[in-house]
Image (cartoon, rainbow, N blue to C red):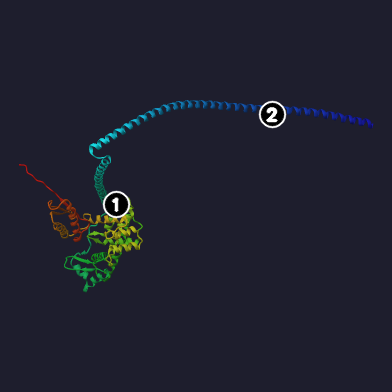
């Protein structure tokens, strides 16, 4: 039993082993076939890649060969061109050599002819070549000096004419563009009264009213025989204005006694302070100079009541500032600095009645106190020509100040003083020898003098005009400048019979 069972088990195991062997062989065969297929696929892929790579290389090689062939063709062409150029250069070189040879022969012949000519010229003239050269150079030098002098003289005259023309244009343009309003009134010293009865009311009982007015305003009231008028006298224009306004208030009110006088003076002082402040602010605003110190503005406003030869000091300063700015623009310098210097050049006139100093010194002190620029301080110091200017703005302000003061109508004189000045001008000119006629023209701004030609020569005219101008400067006072114009005329007269 056990043997049969063991045999069956062995037989079953052998069958199972045989079956496993067969399966293993089949699996091995399958794996072998798959590996073979994969190997064939890999070989095919590698062969395809190798063929593609080979094809690209052949294409690139073909292109490279084509470029090489083109290069070779181009090199062949260039070589051919160089060979032809070389042949051409050889022929040109030969031609140049022939020309050089011909030129050398000609130079030799020319030198020979020059030597013959020089020898002949030396024989004829009696001078050696060096002597003749020195003579020619001397004559040429004299001609050059003469021509140079003529050219220099011509350019000097042209430059002088052009500079004068430019200066006239700058000044004319600047003056024409100034559109300021000029105040025509003179210093107010009288107050009109409605009737002569008002004089007694102003004086008051035992003079108490007039004493109160004079004490509170610091002015002198002159009440004389002048009908319906009271004269206000004071060295301080601001005080005079306060007194004038106070009197007008009292006259309008009709009640005149110390208490009303005190109220009227107080109101007038406030009004004058307001007017002064507004005048200074308006001047600064009109010129666009907004960084000026408030105290300087207030001082400027006081010049509203200051006059010089009937010309209002504040309007004069504004006019000088505007002319200075316009001139500065045309000269290419800073117009704001020039305007500032022009506006403040007479600043000291606002307080010169309060101190024993000139308005120039007072103006310099004020400008330094409130840190004005050095150009402004220099313009204040030099605008009357007493000090040499350091800045171009100072020169501009000097010119603008002269233009404003000498402008027709700017400053009025009495008829008697005007006629006296004209007579003095003609008297000074007629005191010189050789003067035929003298005319003071253009309101005394020009002295036209006609001389006797047989007594005064052309060269003496310049000396005469200078002497007359110097005499006028020494003996007369006048605004602006006076032109001394000396005229010499020679006439030849003949009659046809």
The answer to whether residue 275 of the structure is visible from this angle is no
Q: Quadrant of the C terminus?
A: top left
Label 1 and label 2: CA atoms lie apart by 100 Å
Q: Where residue 70 sits: x, y (%)?
A: 52, 26
Q: Give residue 146's mark.
A: none
Q: Residues within 10 Å of mark 1 (few under 14, many from 20)?
A: many
> Between disc 1 and disc 2, whose residue precedes?
2
Q: Depth check: 43 or 180 in front?
A: 43
Q: Secondary structure at mark 1?
A: helix
Q: Depth check: 93 or 411 in front?
A: 93
Q: Where residue 256 sits: x, y (%)?
A: 24, 69
Residue ID at (50%, 27%): 75
Residue 397: image quadrant is bottom left
| CB atoms of marks 1 and 2 within 8 Å | no
The residue pinned by badge 1 equals: 327
Q: Quadrant of the N terminus?
A: top right
Q: Depth check: 265 or 475 in front?
A: 475
Q: Depth check: 463 or 407 in front?
A: 463
Tell me if residue 357 comes above or below residue 335 in the rendering.
below
Q: Where residue 351 sits: x, y (%)?
A: 29, 64
Q: Where residue 457 sits: x, y (%)?
A: 15, 51
Tell me if residue 220 comes above or below residue 380 in the rendering.
below
* Outermost residue to the left: 497
The residue pinned by badge 2 equals: 42
* Outermost residue to the bottom: 206
Q: Secondary structure at mark 2?
A: helix
Residue 472: image quadrant is bottom left
Residue 294: image quadrant is bottom left
The answer to whether residue 467 of the structure is visible from this angle is yes
């Amino acid at each position: 039993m056990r043997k049969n069972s063991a045999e069956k088990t062995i037989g079953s195991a052998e069958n199972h082993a045989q079956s496993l062997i067969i399966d293993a062989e089949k699996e091995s065969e399958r794996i072998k076939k798959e590996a073979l297929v994969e190997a064939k696929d890999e070989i095919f892929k590698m062969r395809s890649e190798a063929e593609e790579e080979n094809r690209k290389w052949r294409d690139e090689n073909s292109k490279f060969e084509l470029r090489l062939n083109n290069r070779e063709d181009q090199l062949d062409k260039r070589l051919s061109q160089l060979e032809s150029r070389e042949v051409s250069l050889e022929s040109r070189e030969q031609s140049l050599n022939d020309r050089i040879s011909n030129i050398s022969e000609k130079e030799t012949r020319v030198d020979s002819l020059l030597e013959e000519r020089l020898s002949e010229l030396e024989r004829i003239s009696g001078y050696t070549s060096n002597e003749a050269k020195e003579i020619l150079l001397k004559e040429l030098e004299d001609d050059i000096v003469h021509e140079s002098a003529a050219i220099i003289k011509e350019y000097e005259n042209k430059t002088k004419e052009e500079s004068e023309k430019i200066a006239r244009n700058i000044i004319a343009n600047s003056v024409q563009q100034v559109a300021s309003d000029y105040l025509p009134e003179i210093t107010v010293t009288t107050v009109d009264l409605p009737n002569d009865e008002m004089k007694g009311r102003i004086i008051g009982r035992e003079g108490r009213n007039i004493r109160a007015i004079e004490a509170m305003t610091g002015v002198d009231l002159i009440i004389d025989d002048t009908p319906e008028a009271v004269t206000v006298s004071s060295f301080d224009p601001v005080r005079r204005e306060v007194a004038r306004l106070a009197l007008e208030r009292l006259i309008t009110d009709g009640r005149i006694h110390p208490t009303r006088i005190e109220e009227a003076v107080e109101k007038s002082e406030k009004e004058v302070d307001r007017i002064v402040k507004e005048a200074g602010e308006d001047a600064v605003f009109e010129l666009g100079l907004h960084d000026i110190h408030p105290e300087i503005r207030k001082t400027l406003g006081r010049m509203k009541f200051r006059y010089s030869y009937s010309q209002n000091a504040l309007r004069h300063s504004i006019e000088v500032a505007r002319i200075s700015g316009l001139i500065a623009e045309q000269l290419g310098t800073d117009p704001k600095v020039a305007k500032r210097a022009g506006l403040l050049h007479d600043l000291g006139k606002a307080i010169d009645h309060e101190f024993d100093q000139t308005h120039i010194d007072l103006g310099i002190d004020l400008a330094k106190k409130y840190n004005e620029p050095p150009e402004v301080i220099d313009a204040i110091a030099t605008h009357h020509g007493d000090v040499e200017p350091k800045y171009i703005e100072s020169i501009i302000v000097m010119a603008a100040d002269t233009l404003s003061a000498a402008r027709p109508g700017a400053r009025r004189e009495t008829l008697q003083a005007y006629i006296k000045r004209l007579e003095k001008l003609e008297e000074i000119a007629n005191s010189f020898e050789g003067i035929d006629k003298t005319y003071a023209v253009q309101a005394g701004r020009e002295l036209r003098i006609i001389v006797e030609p047989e007594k005064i020569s052309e060269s003496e005219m310049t000396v005469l005009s200078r002497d007359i101008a110097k005499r006028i400067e020494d003996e007369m006072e006048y605004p602006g400048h006076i032109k001394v114009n000396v005229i010499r005329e020679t006439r030849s007269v003949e009659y046809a019979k």
